[in-house]
Amino acid sequence: MDNARPELETDDLHQLRWALGNVLAMLSASCGLFLDLDVVPWVLAVLVVGVTVCRWPTLPGWIPSWGHRLAFPLIVVAVTVDFYGGTDTLTALVRVQLLLLTYRIISYRKRRDDLQVVLLGLFLVVLTGVMTLSLAFAVQLFVFTGCALALLLVTTLADVTRGVNGTADTVAAGAGHRSAPAWAAELRWGRLLRRLRSAVDWRIVALAVGLFGGVVAVTAMLFTAIPRFELGRSFFLDQLITKKTRTGFSESIQFGDVTRIQEDTSVAFTVDGASPDRLPGVPYWRMVVLDEHRDGGFRSSAGLRAELARRSWQRRAAVEGGVTGLKGSRERWTFYLEPGISRYLPLTGAYRELRFNRPMNFQQNIPLRMVALANDPSELVGFEITGMESSAILPDAVQAERTREAAEAAGLGYWRVAASAEDRARLKRWVNEIQDGDDLTAEAFAQRAARWLAARHRYGLESELPAGSGDAVVRWLEGRGPGHCELFAAGFALLARTAGHPARLVTGFKGGSWNEFSGSLIVRNSMAHAWCELWDGSGAWIRVDPTPGAYAVGDPDPELAAAQQRSRTIDGGWGARLDGLRVFWYRRVVNFDQAAQLELVEDVRGGVRLWLERGRTWLKGVSDDAMAWVKRPRSAEQWRLVLIFFVALSLSLWAGLRWGEPALWWLVARLRGRGRRGQAAVRREAARWLRRLPPGRGVAGEVSRVRAELEALRFGRPVERDAARHIFVRARQAVRGARWHRP
C-alpha cells in the first residue's frame, strides 16, 4: 500500500548510532564544567572535536592505522605524566576519561566501543552528582539516561540487521589513506532527520517517554518512602582533590580581592526556613576576621589564628554556639553553602546550636563568632543553625579582660599600624582633624570618621591610588579618588587605631534577596562586602560600615530597620523560579533525611486534608446556592427564560449527538492540513468506520453501498479529506440505522 511506513536502512542505523554516541560523549564530558577541577580546557577540547567531527563525518577516516595503534600508549604516557606532575588524583582521573572520550569521538566505533562510551559517560555523570549535588546533575542524568537508552536500542537494531558478528564498517573507496565507511561518506544530517521523521512511529516514542517518566516517578516515590541512612555522600572522592577556594574569604586578603568576588553574580549560599519578618533588613554575614595590617593588606594574625585553634579539630554533626537560657530565639535557619566559596561559614552572630547534615571536621571560636571547616569544601555544605543573633553589638568577655600589652604579647594586631613614621604622622593629622579637639567615645569617633571618609571619597568598584611610596591605604586616604569597600574599611581601621580604639576588619556578605517562590533568602557573590568592628571599651565590638550608602555605626533605629525590611529585594522573575527549583532540590534531595522525610509526609497529609476540606466547603456552598435559587419566587417572564434555556440545551445535545462527531472530525482534518498525512488520516478513519459497520458482506441496501465506498477509501486511490467527509456522514447514519433495526 502507498501509505506503508518507510523503514530505516542499515546505513541509516549506523549513522544514527554514531551520532548518538558522539552526543552522549559530549554530554558526559560537559559534566566537567560543573566540577571544581582544572579540566575546563580539556572539556572544551572534547566539545570542539565532537562538533567538528559531526560537521565532517569523514575526518576520522584520515587518521592512519598507525595513529590508532599509538593512541593507547600515548594516553598511558599522558596519564603517567599527569599523575606524577603534581595533579590531584581526581583531576587526573577525569582527564583520563576525557582523553578516552576524545579518542572514541575521532574513531569509527563498533558495538563494544559504544558500550565503553556509555560507561565512561556514566562515570563522569555520577562523579558530578557525588561532588556537586547540584540540580544540573539531575537534569543531566535524565538526558544522559535517555541518550544512553536510545544508543543501546539503535546499536541492537544495527546488530540485528547486519548480524552481531558481522562487520559494521564498509570501507569506501577513497584517495590516499582515507578509509571512511560507506555510511559516513553518505551521511547528510538533513536527509537522516527526514528519514527519521517519516520512519519513526511517534506513538511508540510517546509511549517510551511515558514509561521512562513513570519509572522516574516511581523512583522518586521510593526515594521519599525508604528509610534514610547516612552513608557519607562523597565516600573517598573528596580526599582525592586538593581543596581550594575561588574567593578571597581566607586568612589573608589583598585590596581588590572582595571586589573581584562582586563581579560574580552566581549564588554563594542560600538561607532556608527563615521568616522574612525575623530577618534583619540588611543582614551582615560574618565569615573572616582580620586584624593584622601588613604589606598593603589585612590578614589574620598568628594570635587570632591561635584563638580560633584553641579547641582542637572536632568531627561532629552538632555543636553549641554559646547562646543559652532564655536569650535568643529558637528559630531554625538552614544554610546551603555552595562549593568553592570559603571554608568559613557565614554567621550573623552567636547562636544556640549548629548542626551539620553529616559529621564534619571543624574549629569553632565563640567570642569571634567564627566556624572554620578543615578544608575548603569541594561540594555543597548543608548546616542548620538554631537561635542565631543578628545584632551589630557583639559582646566579647575574653577581649574585655585583656590589656593592650597582653593583646600585643598574644600576637593580636587590634592596635597595630604597620606603616612608616611619615604615614603614621599623616594618620595622626587626619585623626586630629576628625576629633577637632573633642574627647570622643569609640561610637562618636566612628560616626565622625565615617562622615569624614564619605566627604573625601566616593564609592566605586574601580579605585584610584595616588602614585608614590608608602602604605597603599594611607596614599588612598590622602587622595580624593573613589574606592571600594575594602579601602573604606581598611582606612577606617587605621584611623581608629591611630585614635587609640582597637579595630578589626571583617569580610563576608551583606544583604540578600528574598525568593518568593522558594521562601528563602538568596545571597550571591556580588553581595561580598568588607566592614569593620570597633571595640567600645566596655566589653563589646560595634559593627561599623564606613562605605558610603551604608548605615555607619551599630544597629539602625527601629524606623530605619523597618524601612530596610520593606525595601528588601524581591526576586520574582524566571531566574528566581530556577533558584526556587534549586532550593527544592536541596530540601528534598541533598538535605533529605529522616526528619525531612517525616516532614514531607506531614505536609502531604496536611495538604490532602486541606484540599478535601476546601472541596467539601465548595460543594456545600454550590448546593446551598442552587437550593436557594430553586426556592426563590419567580415571575412568569423568568419562567419563560428558564424554559427557553432548557429547550436550547436539549436541541444542542441532540445536534451534537447527530452531527457532532463528523463535524469534529472535519474540524480536526482542517487543522491538520492536507497531503500524505491527510490521506493517511482518511484511511485510518475509513478503517474505523468499517469496524463499526454490521458484519457480513451480504447486507443489502445503504449499508452495502457505504461499505463499498469505505473500502475504496481504505484501500483505493488517495482521496482528500473534504471529498471523504460526506461518506463518513453516511457511514454514521448507516451505523445508527443498523442499531435501530437490530432484532
Image (cartoon, rainbow, N blue to C red):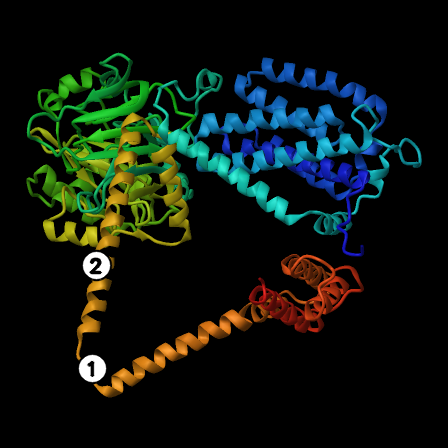
The residue lying at 12 percent from left, 53 percent from top is: 559
* Residue tagged 1: 634
The C terminus lies in which quarter of the figure?
bottom right
The N terminus lies in which quarter of the figure?
bottom right
Which residue lies most toward the bottom here? 637
Q: Which disc is residue 620 wearing?
A: 2
Residue 272's image quarter? top left
Q: Amino acid at mark 1?
A: Arg
Q: Secondary structure at mark 1?
A: loop
Q: Is residue 83 above or below residue 286?
A: above
Comparing 652 with 363, the one in front is: 652
Q: Position of residue 552 (x, y in %)?
A: 18, 45
Q: Is residue 283 above or below residue 341?
A: below
Q: From the viewer's perspective, is 555 left or right of 113?
A: left
The residue lying at 53 percent from left, 72 percent from top is: 658
Q: From the viewer's perspective, is 619 left or right of 234?
A: left
Select label 1 or label 2 by which is in front. Answer: 1
Q: Is residue 426 visible?
A: no
Comparing 308 with 389, the one in front is: 389
Q: Is residue 256 above or below residue 405?
A: below
* First along the sequence among labels 1 and 2: 2
